[in-house]
Image (spheres, rainbow, N blue to C red):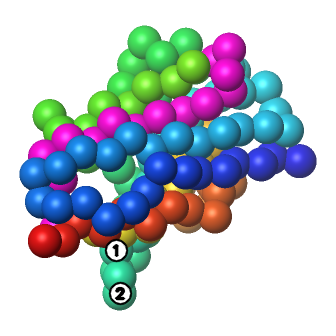
Amino acid sequence: QVQLVESGGGLVQPGGSLRLSCAASGFSFSDYWMNWLRQAPGKGLEWVSSINSGGGTTYYADSVKGRFTISRDDNKNTLYLQMHSLKPEDTAVYYCAKGPPHNIATMPRGQGTQVTVSS
């Protein structure tokens, strides 16, 4: 079955950087769009970024554009999110999710990794 395991979260000061990883298994990773979603405390699930199969097309939410970079390594079945210039409002649980970004609520996703941006 689909398994997505996120890692790389933690506590970082404003302006800092983190790189999240998502190890995928149970499906043909290279054939699928992949995504990063996040959920801040007390808020709903939010789409962050998507990358197509092959990695040639990427999309970003306006709130992270220019600061975050999504990438994938199909040889390692791994999805990444490089985050720079982090802000307190980026604090959330970050999830990787499988599939085209049509309905984020129904996408298979992992257990999430906590990112906390605070001084």
Is residue 72 in view?
Answer: yes
Residue farthest along the right direction in this orientation: 1
> Mark 2 falls on what kind of element?
loop
Residue pictured at 66% horizontal, 39% vertical: 23
The reply to whether the C-beta atoms of the residues labelled 2 and 1 are less than 8 Å apart is: yes
Q: Magenta segment, which residues?
A: 74-90
Which residue is disc 2 drawn over? 42
- Distance in Å between CA atoms under marks 2 and 1: 6 Å
* Residue 104 shows in the view: no
Position of 74 relative to 8 (above/below): above
Q: Tell me what residue is drawn at x 38 percent, y 32 percent.
A: 70
For residue 7, side relative to residue 43 (left or right):
right
Is 40 on the left or on the right of 67, as rendered?
A: right
Secondary structure at badge 1 equals loop
The 10 Å Cα crowd at callout 2, few under 14, some 14 to 19, many 20 or more, is few
Quarter of the image where one finds residue 100 = top right
Q: Amino acid at mark 1?
A: Ala
Specify whether residue 11 is painted magenta.
no
What is the total number of numbered labels drawn onto the structure image? 2
> Where is residue 40 drawn, in percent x and y?
34, 74
Is residue 89 located in the magenta-colored stretch of the structure? yes
Residue at 89% from the left image edge and 47% from the top image edge: 1
Q: Position of residue 87 (x, y in %)?
A: 14, 60
Look at mark 1 in the image and give the residue it sits on. Answer: 40
- Amino acid type of disc 2? Gly
Report crowding for label 1: few under 14, some 14 to 19, many 20 or more residues within 10 A (C-alpha). Answer: some
Residue visible at 35% across and 87% down?
42
Q: Position of residue 43 (x, y in %)?
A: 34, 80
Q: Is residue 41 left or right of residue 61?
A: right
